[in-house]
Image (tube, grey):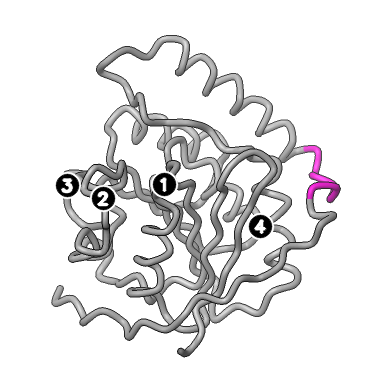
C-alpha cells in the first residue's frame, strides 16, 4: 500500500463527559466478563518477570465501558470504526465490539498478543487484532521526548497491513503512560480525520474525550 500523506492538522476540541457516567448500569454479562478479566490480569501480573510485559497496566474497564456506552449514545460519529492503541489484553476492543463498533486493536508485545487472542476467543468478540506498531509512519517525529514508552515498538505498522490509515477510524482509544498524553493527542491531531474522536483513560476516575475539528 502507498500511504496517503498525513491528514491536515486541525485542532482538538474537548468534549465534557457527563459527571454521572460512572453511575451508568453495566449489563450483568459485561460485569461478569470484566470480573473474570481482572482475575486473568492479576494472574498474569503475579507471574511476570523481565521477559514479560512490564509496561502493562490495566485500566478501569468498568469506567471505560460506561464512557464508551455514553459516547455511543450521545456523540455524533463519522463512522463506526474503532481502534485501541496498545491494546494489552484487548479488553477495551472487546467492549467496543459489544457496543456495536467495528473494532480493531494493536499491540506490539508478544506475551500480550497471546493474551489478547485469548480474550477475543473467550469473549467471544469480533476484533481485528494486529501484532505491531500503532503509530502511523512518521509519527515518532512528533515526540518531544525520545524515551516515551509509545516509541520504539518494533514490527510493521498496522495501518499498512490493514491497507488503511488512521483517518479511516472514527474513534481511537488509548491509555497513555504519564507524560505521553500530549504525544497521543498530537499524533491524533496530525493523522486522524476531522470529526473523529480520541478517548483516553488518563488515571483513576478520569477519562478524557476530544474531537478533531477544523482549525
Does label 2 or label 4 sit earlier along the sequence? Answer: 4
Give the secondary structure at mark 4.
helix
Which residue corresponds to the image point at 68% horizontal and 65% vertical from the top-left? 71
Find disc 3 in the rendering and name its residue. 155
- The residue that mark 4 highlights is 68
- The residue labelled by disc 2 is 145
Residue at screen point 26% across, 79% down: 6
The reply to whether dot 4 and dot 1 touch (C-beta < 8 Å) is no
Residue assigned mark 1 = 179
Q: CA distance from mark 2 to mark 3?
A: 21 Å
Residue 140 horizontal/vertical position (percent): 22, 58
The relative height of residue 156 versus residue 81 in the rendered view (above or below) is above
Number of numbered markers: 4
The image's mark for residue 15 is: none
Question: Does the residue at mark 4 contact the one at mark 3 (Cβ under 8 Å)?
Answer: no
Q: Is residue 4 left or right of residue 118?
A: left
Amino acid at each position: 500500500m502507498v500511504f496517503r500523506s498525513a491528514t491536515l492538522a486541525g485542532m482538538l476540541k474537548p468534549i465534557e463527559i457527563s459527571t454521572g457516567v460512572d453511575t451508568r448500569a453495566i449489563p450483568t454479562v459485561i460485569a461478569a466478563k470484566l470480573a473474570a478479566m481482572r482475575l486473568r490480569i492479576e494472574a498474569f501480573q503475579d507471574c511476570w518477570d523481565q521477559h514479560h510485559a512490564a509496561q502493562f497496566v490495566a485500566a478501569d474497564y468498568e469506567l471505560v465501558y460506561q464512557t464508551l456506552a455514553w459516547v455511543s449514545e450521545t456523540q455524533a460519529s463519522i463512522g463506526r470504526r474503532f481502534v485501541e492503541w496498545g491494546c494489552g489484553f484487548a479488553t477495551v476492543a472487546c467492549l467496543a465490539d459489544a457496543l456495536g463498533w467495528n473494532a480493531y486493536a494493536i499491540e506490539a508485545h508478544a506475551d500480550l498478543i497471546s493474551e489478547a487472542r485469548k480474550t477475543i476467543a473467550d469473549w467471544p468478540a469480533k476484533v481485528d487484532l494486529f501484532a505491531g506498531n500503532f503509530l502511523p509512519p512518521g509519527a515518532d517525529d512528533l515526540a518531544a521526548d525520545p524515551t516515551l514508552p509509545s516509541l520504539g515498538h518494533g514490527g510493521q505498522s498496522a495501518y499498512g497491513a490493514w491497507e488503511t490509515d488512521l483517518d479511516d477510524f472514527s474513534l481511537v482509544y488509548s491509555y497513555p503512560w504519564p507524560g505521553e498524553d500530549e504525544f497521543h493527542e498530537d499524533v491524533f491531531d496530525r493523522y486522524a480525520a476531522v470529526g473523529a474522536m480520541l478517548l483516553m483513560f488518563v488515571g483513576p476516575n478520569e477519562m478524557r474525550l476530544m474531537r478533531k475539528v477544523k482549525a
